[in-house]
Amino acid sequence: MSSHIPYPSSKPLNPDELIQQCANYHAFLEKRRSLRFFSDHPVPREAVEQLIMAASSAPSGANKQPWTFCAVGSLELKKQIREAAEEEEYRSYHGRMSKEWLRDLAPFDTDWRKPFLETAPWLIIVFRRIYEFGEEGKKENNYYVNESVGLACGFLLTALHQAGLVALTHTPSPMDFLTKLLGRPANEKPFLLIPIGYPAPDATVPDIQRKPAERVIAWYE
Ligand code: IYR
């Protein structure tokens, strides 16, 4: 039985206004960059809650919203997460990653050290919920979990950007240590570790380019 409610309709803009509006938003998003240098300037918990709820407004398979966002502000827990991530990353950079992979990463100047995991005021650890525990502990399916959680993370990044905040979509690998440190249940798997905050005053970013339209769009008109 479905029940639908009206969607507030919008009046079409004139085409020039529409193009300008789209161009403005594109220009705004072009300024977003992944940051590895964070200030320790605090971000209030209430802001983090709004950012996460903006992320949680993303579409998801059968509206299951198959995600949990862990917001870690505790210095002690951030330190433990840094230490565990660096241990895995040390092994990755010293043998687990291929030569080709290390070559592809060279422009980013990354290594196994992850001080930003302690400096950033908050770490948002996103978990994908691969199933739910229904009545009597029965497993209930979620759908398109990776797509859904990816979309929610995209929403989070744009919400952060509009607030003048920065983030790094960090993927220490493997990430099982996050399940243990945060005591997450068996139906949740770590998806992304996202430090958020303000950029350090002397922050730099790699000098890299985005692909132009003709390399990302195939038109069929
Ligand atoms: N997870 C490692 C390595 C790494 C991999 C990719 I692909 C990147 O775009 C960046 C880093 C790290 O975070 O250093």
Image (cartoon, rainbow, N blue to C red):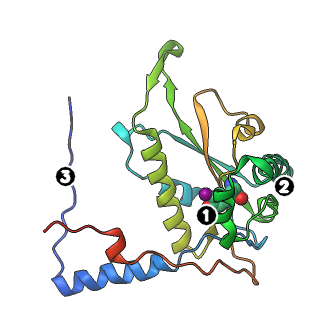
Q: Residue furthest top?
A: 136
**Does residue 195 appear to the left or right of 64 in the view shown?**
right
**Visible in this render: residue 49?**
yes
Q: Mark 2 to mark 3: distance in Å?
A: 46 Å
Please name the amino acid that badge 3 sits on.
Pro
**Disc nearest the viewer among 2 and 3:** 2
User: Could you tell me residue 212's position as x and y percent?
Assistant: 39, 78
Q: Distance between the residues labelled 3 and 1?
A: 30 Å
Amino acid at the residue labelled 2: Leu
Q: CB under 8 Å between callouts 2 and 3?
A: no
Classify the position of the N terminus by image quarter.
top left
Residue at image position (36%, 72%) is 215
Q: Residue 7: give x, y in percent of width and height.
A: 21, 56
Q: Residue at x 69, y 57 (%)?
A: 99
Q: Which of 74 and 174 is in front in this view?
A: 174
Few, some or many C-alpha atoms within 10 Å of disc 3 (few <14, some 14-19, many ≥20)?
few
Q: Name the residue under label 2.
A: 75
Indicate if the residue with disc 1 has its beta carbon within 8 Å of ligand 1: no
Label 2 SS: helix
Label 1 belongs to which residue?
Answer: 47
